[in-house]
Each structure stands twice: as structure tokens, then as C-alpha cells.
Image: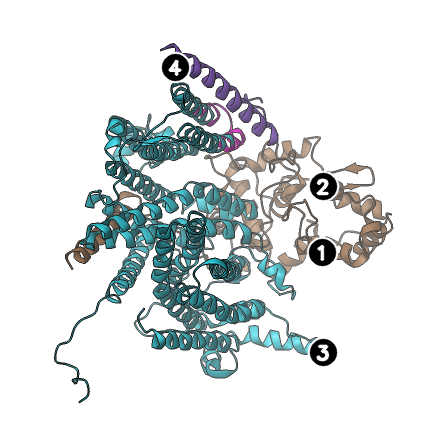
Chain colours: A purple, B cyan, C brown
Amino acid sequence: MKDYVIPFVAAFVAFGVLFLALDFAVMRLQGLTLIFQQ
Amino acid sequence: MRQRHSGVAGRAVLVLVLAFVVVAALGAGAGPFAALTEAAAQTADAGAGEATGAAQANGGGAPVVVPPKLTAADYPRIAGVNGRVVVWLVAQLHLWFAAFVLAVPIFVFIIEAIGMRTRDRRYDDMAYEFIKVSITAYSLTAILGGLLTFSLVLFYPDLFRYLSSIFKESMFYYALLFFAESATLYVYYYGWQWLQGGFRKWVHLTLGLLLNAVGTVLMLLANAWVTFMMSPAGVDSAGVYSGDAWAAIHNFLWNPINLHRFVANIAFGGSIVGAYAAFKFLSATRAEEKAHYDWMGYTANFIAISALLPLPFAGYYLAAEIYAYSQQMGITLMGGIFAWLFIIQAVLIGTLFLAANYYLWCGMGRSEGAVRYNRYVKYLAIVIVAAFLVWFTPHTLVLTNEELKALGGPYHKYLGPLGIMPAKNTAVNVMILFTALSFLIYRRANKIATASWVRAGNAAQVALFASGILNIFFLGIYHGYFTNTVYKVAASIPQVLTTLIVIIASTVIDSLMYRRAREVAPLRWGRVPPRAQYALFLLAVAFTWLMGLMGYIRSGIRQHWHVVDIVRDNSPDAFTPTLGYAANVVSVGTILFMAMVLFVFWLSQVSGTKTHAAGYWKAEGA
Amino acid sequence: MKNLLAVTAFTLLTVAFFAGFSNYGIPQIEPAPPPKEEKLDLGAMTMDQFVALGDRIFNGRGTCTLCHNAVGGRAPLLDRAAVVALERLADPRYQGEATDAESYLHESMVKPSAYVVAGFGKTGTNDTVSPMPDVSSGSIGLSEAEILAVIAYLQQIAGTDITVEIPTDAAEAAETAAAGEAEGEPRPPYKTPEEAISEFTCGACHKVGSEEGDVGPDLRKIGAKRDKEYLRRAILDPNAEVAKGFERDLMPTDYGVQMYAQELEMIVDYLAGLK
């Protein structure tokens, strides 16, 4: 069980961070922020 | 090989006739079409007069190309024939066949190269068979092209004169290029078995590359004429041509259409070849034949789906550029009268995804090893069907007055929000992701991974998909419903990038995990139920119909203009038809096309048949 | 043979499904027929008829309601435009040439970028460039009389007095437009290039003089890069050649009508001298 859960959590966090970074970067490139402002 | 000399001569004559027709048509005003165009141009003489007048004012320099101002009388009629529908149908039929004959050399080239790399003859044989199918289709493409030119000259002579005055160089070289296209295609096909082995094989592959290059140039030229009519360039606001042919070719929508058509051709071509394989599979009697065509069908489907996945984005880019060019055209396209057509498009695309996935799930039965994945299939099906339902839910409902009162407006309280773009983007990204997942599972079906980190690898895969899907939903729901229009549209970019990253990353992880994998049960080609072949047919018909619909939209957003803002369409048929009417014309076209395609398939079967006519021929030596 | 029949039947069924859905599953909207060029008999028209003409154009070939509607937030709503016009004129951002509601509405239609209502500009232009086209040209192509009819209609629906005068014939209306003044007298030509550049609001988009517009190319040293012929053409026909990195269809295309030849030459000479 452990040898599944730990890699899962690690990968989930890693990919999650990657996707959020992607969102932030691409929204920035379009002159916007990730969270809605104004 | 059968003697085909008469066939080659016949085709050469056809091409020469086509070249003559095009060159002659360009000389409208001289040659065989003079009487026709002059009779039709009585009232459009103002335009012609201006042209000559201006030429004289120029002191005898190059004649100035002035757009015609047309009235209803300028459009010749043939009793019992609706010129607009004729041009519409012939143009669409030509385009279907052209897309096919341009796409096939692309993947034939790739398959031949794979064959050369792996030295597996089956790839070479399959590539050869694909080209064989497209040879007959090539004749039909040329016939339809000639018919299209005739129809344009007959029913829209003044418009054609204006366009051909601007594009005279590209049209002339387009016609000449067909010599190159025919030459490369014929040597590539007829010389296939001759140019085998070592250096000759490289020559052959290069011929394939040349064939693709010539075909692509032909498409680029024809695309220029069509996009000029949507986003004219190289002419001033009155439509007077400046003489800069490159500006007219390189107009605003040229490259978006080039990209979209290039990718779409591959998807469409793959689906037609898949239908061919399906047809041959159903007709096959021997096990090796069934195995061969099953494999061919799978490969064709793979090509079609691989090209289908990036296609929504090429389409989105095209629509965005249409919007950037003319906000009016863009709004007519997606917010005005053509908006409902995109709901029909949604149904078609949903059909494509369902058919492709269904084919994959059926195909899992080729290996016993797939049994362990069977339980996941129903979840994939549920997700894809749900995504399809969201994808095709409209925003505004068709209601009677009583229903409107009862509902309190034209939107459903809960389903209405599913009708707007963020929901649809989310749905399509999910459909694409889950299709990729189907592929992943299919590829794993007959193998067991031997890598030491399998558990961790699988956990990573699940985490990848989970986080990717969560991100897609976050971007779709938060930015779609809790921000404003600008954020809403902007969020669709990271959404699609997420899908692409998940697909690429999962493919990489899986291929690493399954290196040196053990085959647990062999893939038995041919062991697939007949209904899987009908899925391939559904794919082909749906692709065709969808292409017809999209072609109508592209042409129709010009509304009552031949060349937007420059040449007004004043024919009796200038009206934009109802959606049902347009769908009916597309349907007729699809049926005609499928009939011709079935004819092509049947020909390829018949050409291999020999009937022994006992007693017919004189005995030898008599 | 059996296969051929089965496949044919399947194809026909599939096509029938798509055609059936398109005919019965979605609303059969009848698109408006192509607009007819109406022959206007202006001399015989009452104001009510003129307003009705404006109504027809507003909801028809003017294509106004394509963007000016309650759905989508693409353009300001116009039901009180004739009243709101006065607020717009009072806005410190307003740098156009209108002096009253009627001329403001007129300017909004033929020079939409002269003043862009906050939040409705093209993305990235900071509300300096309007996505609205000039209605007097291109595919909308309203005549001066038709534009006045629409203004009359807008004044009517806002409940204000109608100040528009029905042009007695199309030719007179065209002259009024060309002169650009409500009184029908030609305006005096601008005396200096700086005045002309300011009056034609070049600085709204270009860096020139003391202005810092950033929608179009920087003109402060344009004379070093471009000759007079290029500059003249760029003013008269901006879309003939768009500078790299800039978008087409932003610069007004009617300077050839607005400027006197003398003013054009003055501006071209001035720009050519900026090295």
C-alpha cells in the first residue's frame, strides 16, 4: 500500500505545482493574473 | 502486375484537358468562352468599360483590375439548374477528394519510412495499398476540379474574371504544377516495385517527399484564392488591384486556413482509408486477409485520431483569426446566425470521439491480456458520454411561448450554464484526455511491465491524470463562471496545454515503464467483431459530413458578398439559407461522395479479379 | 454484395441522422435576406418616417444590434445613448471634436476610436482603440442620410429632442459630411503641422511630438526610415502596408476625406523631416 500512496502523493503534488505554474505563466503572458482582479 | 498502359494514357489525356480548360478559362474574353461571358456581361459592361477606360488613361500600361458591380441579370442561368447549389456541391466534392489525395501521400511517406527503418515489409505493402486507393481518387479529383472551373465560368463569369485577373499567375502555374503532381504520383506508384532495395528505395522515398511538396504547394495556391474572398488583400478599399500578387495570396486568413486544412486533411484522409480497410475486412474470407485489413484499419484509425486531437486548436486559431480580421464576421460566425451550426458540429465531433473510442475498446479483444482492463472501459464510456452531452448542450433553448413563460426565459436554470464556452472547452479537453487514456490502456493490453518501479509508475500516472483533470476543471469553472470574458477566454490556453502535457507525459512514462515488457498474450490481428468496422465507417461518414458543414460555414460567413466588402453578391441566390437547407445540401454531397468512394473501393477489388472465359477466345494456333 | 448493401444502408442512416438533427433538433432560424439598397425620397419624408428609417437601419443593415445588445457585453447599450452622450463629452478622457449629443453620436459612428467608453476597447489598447468599424465604409456602408436617420432614432428612443435635420437630398447630405461641420461651412485649414497632428489625434496611437500613443509605430524619427511617398500612402491607405508587429484595421482609413490636400502635404513634409 505504502509503495503506491507515497509515489501517488509525491507525483500529485509535483504535477499540481507544475500545472499551477503553467496556469500562472500563461495567464501572465496574456497580461492577466491567475486569480481574477478588477 | 496488370497492364495499365491505356490507363496511364487516359489519365495523361485527362490532365492535359484539365490544363487546357483552366488556361482557356483564364483567357475569358478570348477563346471559347468569349461568347458566353460577353452575353452575360451586358449589364456588367460598366465594370469592363471602367477597366478599359482606366487602361487607356494609364497610357496603355497594364490594365487596371476593377471589381465588377453586379446585378441579378449578370448571372447566367441554365433552365432547371440551380447554379449556386451546383458550384457548392462541386466545390465541396472537389475539396473532399483533394483533401484525400493530398493526405494519403503524407502518411504513406511516413509508413514507407517506418518500413525502411524496421525492414518490415508489411509496412511497405500497406503503404503501397494506400497509394493504390488514392490513384483512382486522383482522377475523380481532377474531373471535379475541371467541373468546378466550368461551373464558376458558367454561373459566375464576372466574378471569375475579376478573380482570375488578380490571380492569373498563380492559376497558370497551378495548372502547370499538375504535370509535376501527376508525374511524381505515377512514377511513385507504378515504380513502387521497380524502385526496391538500397539506393533505389531512397530514390523512391524522395519521390514521395517530392509528391508531398508539390501537393502542398497546390493546396497553398488554392487556399489563397478562397481566403482572398474572405479577407481580401492587395486591393484597396474599392477593390482595385494593386498588382501585388504576393499580397493577394498572403492575405490575413491564408496561413490559418493552411494550417487547419493541412491537419484536417490528415485526419480526414486517415478516416477514409480506415473505411477502405473496414470494407475490405468485411469482404475478406481468409484469415490472413482479415488480419491484414484489421491491422490496416487500426493504423488508419490511429492516424485519423492523432490528427484529430490537435484539430480543435487549429480550428480555434482559425476562428480567432477570423474574429481578429473582422469582428463582424467573427460574431456572425459564433454569436450570430451561424452559432447554432456549432451545436451540430458538437454532435459530429462527439460522434467522432465516441466512434474512435468504441473502435479501440472493441480492439482490446484482440488480446486475452486485455480482459484485466475490461472493467475500466465502462468508466471511460461514462465519462466520454457525459462530456459529449455537456459538449452539445445549447445555451439558448428552442421554446414555444408557453414554455418560455413556464421556464421564465430561454435558458434552463441548471443546464443553461453548460451551454457556454468554458463548459464546452472543459468537456472537449476531457474527451481528448480520455481518448488518449483509451489508447494507453489499449497499448498496455497485451503486455506486462517488468520494470522494478511499476507500482510507483502507475501511481504517478494516476496522479498525473488526476491533477491534470483537476486543473482543467479549475480553469474551466473558476475562470469560466467567476471572472469576466477576458479571463474566461485566456484560461482556455493553459487548459489545452494541460491536456497536451498530460498526453505527452503519460506516453513518456508508459513507454519507459513498458521497455522490455513481457507480452502476456499476443495481439491477434483479425480477431475483432464486425461492429468495430462499422465504427470505422461511422468515423468516415461523420468526418465527411463535418467537413461539408464546416466548408459551408467558412463560405457562408461572407453572406451576401462574393469577395467580402469588395464584390457584392447580387445573384438571386445570394441569400443565406436556413440551417436545415444547408444541412440537406451537405447531406446530398456526403451521399454522392460516399457513393464515389465506394466506387473507388469496389474498383480496387475488381481490378484484382480475373474471370476465366471458357470457350470465348480462339484456340491457340488457329 | 451483402457487405456493399449493408455499408450503403449504414451510410444513409448515419447521414439521415445528421440531416434529421439539423432540420428538427435545432431552431430553423431564417437569416435576414441580403439588404436591399433603399432609394430614399428624403424630400417627402416626415420626421416620424425618418426616425422609422433609422429604426430599420439600426435593426437591419446597420448591423448595430450585432454588438450593441444585452448579451455578451461587447458594446455599450444604446437605449439612452443620446442622453449619455453629454456625460461622455464631459469626460476628461474625451478628446474628440464633437460639441453636442448629435455630433457625438455622429463621431461615434464614423470615428469610433475618437473616444472609447471605458472597458469596451480592444484588448491591450487601454480603451484607446475601438473594435467598432466606421459605419460609413466597408460592408455596412451607411450613407450620410442613413447615419443621420440612426441618430434621429437614437434621440427618439432616449426621449430627447430630435435635433437632426432631414437632408433634402442625398447630394447635400454628402456635402455636409465632407465638410465635417453641422453648419455646412468648410472648416478653416490647420496652419501648422503640430496643430494638424493634434486635431487629427495622431498622438492617440503614435509617439509623435509630445504624445505617447503606443498602438501604432513610433513616428519621432520616422523621416530617417521612410520617404514621403510611403508616409503619404500610410496616411491615405493605412492597410496597404502595415508595419511589422502592428495590427491592421486600427488606423482610420478616411483621412483622405478628412484632410485638405494642403494639410496632408504639410504633415508628410513634417514627418519626413523627423530624423
- Residue that badge 2 annotates: C205
Residue A11 position (above or below residue B578)? above
The x and y percentages for residue B218 are: 50, 62
Which residue is under mark 3?
A: B59
Q: For the residues marked 3 and 4, what is the alpha-carbon distance in whole angstroms?
A: 85 Å
Q: Tell me the CA gap for discs 4 and 2.
A: 60 Å
- Is C52 contained in the magenta span? no
Front tag of 3 and 4: 4
**Which amino acid type corresponds to the residue marked 4 in the rendered image?**
Tyr
The residue that disc 4 covers is A4
**Residue placed furthest toward the bottom:** B622
Mark 2: which amino acid? Answer: Cys
What amino acid does circle 1 point to? Leu
Q: Residue at x 39, y 10 (%)?
A: A2
The stretch in magenta equals B477-493
Q: Nearer the viewer, mark 3 or mark 1?
A: 3
Determine which quarter of the picture holds residue B477.
Answer: top left
Q: Secondary structure at mark 2?
A: loop
